[in-house]
Image (cartoon, rainbow, N blue to C red):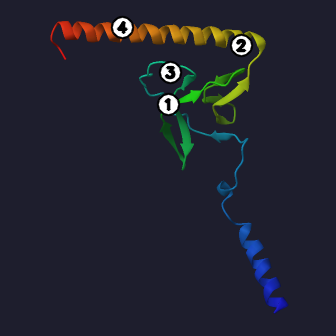
Amino acid sequence: MKLFTTTACVIALSAAMYLPTQAIAEPNFSIVIGNAPPPERYERVPHARRGYIWAPGHWVWSHNRHVWQRGHWERVRAGHSYYAPQWREESDGWHHQRGEWRRAERHERHENRRNDAISRHEERRNNIIEHHERRVDRILGRH
């Protein structure tokens, strides 16, 4: 019985060596491929949302081909700056760098507060414009 159990364990461990490596989670990895990603797609950026930033859509490498990943909202992280995903061409091929949040330097934090203020201003301006457009539509009988 011990021989059978030992043999079964050896076979199971040997088989585990041949499992696909994609099943193993690697938080810091780099994708390098030979062909360039397609041109960026146009995405309409939605109106600003307080406390969020827009992470633009981008190409990802999945199942041996480029796949478009749509843009999405990211919650703002105090004291951090968001760096969008990007492809870089280097001597050994195209490198994909995932989007990430990085701790902001002091001058970046000031710039982020300034950009937040601009976003809030743009949001208020868009709301006023929409309000006036609805008002004009009501006056002219266009619902």
Q: Amino acid at mark 1?
A: Gly
Cα–Cα gap, marks 1 and 4: 25 Å
Of residue 117 and residue 53, the one placed in the foreground of this image is 117
Q: Residue at x 44, y 22 (%)?
A: 46
Q: Which residue is most to the bottom? A: 1
Marks 3, 2: nearer the viewer: 3
Q: Amino acid at mark 3?
A: Arg
Bin the neighbour count of mark 3 within 10 Å (Cα to Cα): few under 14, some 14-19, many 20 and up: some
In the visual, does 53 lie left or right of 123?
A: right
In the visual, does 8 lie left or right of 60?
A: right
Of the numbered discs 2 and 4, the one sitting upstream in the chain is: 2
Local secondary structure at mark 1: loop
In the rendered image, which quarter is residue 50 located in? top right
Quadrant of the rendering where the C terminus is positioned: top left
Of the numbered discs 3 and 1, the one sitting upstream in the chain is: 3
Q: Are marks 3 and 2 in contact (CB under 8 Å)?
A: no
Of the numbered discs 1 and 4, the one sitting upstream in the chain is: 1
Cα–Cα gap, marks 3 and 2: 20 Å
Of residue 52 and residue 33, the one placed in the foreground of this image is 52
Which residue is denoted by mark 2 in the rendering? Answer: 108
Which residue is denoted by mark 3 in the rendering? Answer: 49
Of residue 27 and residue 61, the one placed in the foreground of this image is 27
Which residue is denoted by mark 1 in the rendering? Answer: 71
Of the numbered discs 3 and 4, the one sitting upstream in the chain is: 3
Q: Position of residue 121 (x, y in %)?
A: 51, 7
Q: Amino acid at mark 4?
A: Ile
In the rendered image, which quarter is residue 116 located in? top right
Marks 2, 4: nearer the viewer: 4
Local secondary structure at mark 3: loop
Q: Residue at x 75, y 78 (%)?
A: 11
Q: Amino acid at mark 2?
A: Glu
